[in-house]
Amino acid sequence: MKILVTGRIGQVAWELRRTLACLGEVVALERGSTPLSLDLADADSIRLAVQTVKPQLIVNAAAYTAVDKAEQNFELAHAVNATALSFLAEEAKRVGAGIIHYSTDYIFPGNACTPYLETDRTGPQGVYGASKLAGEQAIIDSGIPHYILRTAWVYGNRGGNFLLTMLRLLRERELLRVVDDQIGSPTWSRLIAEATTVVIAQSVQKDRFAPGGKSGIYHLTCGGQTSWFDFAQAIRAAGIASGLLPETCARIEPIPSSEYPTPAKRPAYSVLNNDKLAEVFGLRLPHWQEALELCLAEAGRGSLPLS
């Protein structure tokens, strides 16, 4: 199997390049990569990449993820997160490929009190969420075999994410103030990639990527739920336990979102229900606290750079 991964060094794409290698040839492309590049904001670049690689499967791990900047960069966010998916799907249909696409908890309004199901009404609160929802619809409308995997609060040992930001600030400052009224499920990028690999392996075995195969939306997050404040507290505790942080690192103080205004409004509650993934694929990611400990244990061994 030949698999085209959009992105090379993103949190999920970097992990996918390793986990997918056991399934076949992985071609990971991004803007400016050589000898062939892939710019999701450029339709011609998308067409050339897909027609050159001729994959059996496209895994779209690249996205415009700057949630606040998207409020000012509406056109670019929609070009990368929505319009590009129409072109990817069009080219996938030409070469007979299926698509796996990652979406986000930010497509929901955040006014629920129980975990969102795949069938629940959407209602993004900002440009980023709206662009990702439009990307989902573009894939669905294309009619090609697909899995849309919605995930949330993604972090890892590389790239730009909440975990690495907290580890840095906990070393640099005496006090951090973190919002405690936004609830979600932190999810390690490694587990997203590993679960994706299992989904693909099962799908290939059962011909789910064949025309008329099993397509649909699935939620894919770690178990449990927490606030950004409690997540930060857990990072502090696990960081000290693993030797990544000194015991004298910064204290953390909870604050409401009203004291930390941002250009983009975040959903107050965006926990996703993962039962469908478990029922169809037999997959359920571990609790977010267990995943965090595994991630930091790996970082403590020095196998990955904290940057």
Image (cartoon, grey):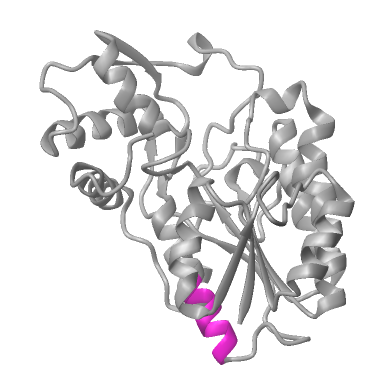
Residue at the (57%, 69%) spot, across then down? 26
Q: Position of residue 264 (x, y in %)?
A: 66, 23
For the residue pair 167 and 237, the one nearer the viewer reads as 167
For the view shown, which residue lies furthest in the front direction?
A: 35
For the residue pair 153 and 2, the one nearer the viewer reads as 2
Left or right side of 245 for 167: right
- Above or below, 184 relative to 17: above
Which corner quadrant of the image does residue 239 belong to? Answer: top left
Residue at the (26%, 49%) spot, across then down? 303
Is 100 within the magenta? no
Q: Is residue 261 visible?
A: yes
Q: Position of residue 94 (x, y in %)?
A: 87, 75
Which corner quadrant of the image does residue 139 belong to? Answer: bottom right
Residue at the (25%, 34%) spot, across then down? 234
The boundaries of the magenta stretch are 197-205
Most frequent secondary structure within the magenta stretch: helix
Q: Quadrant of the N terminus?
A: bottom right
Q: Is residue 114 visible?
A: no
Q: Quadrant of the C terminus?
A: top left
Q: Position of residue 271 (x, y in %)?
A: 49, 46
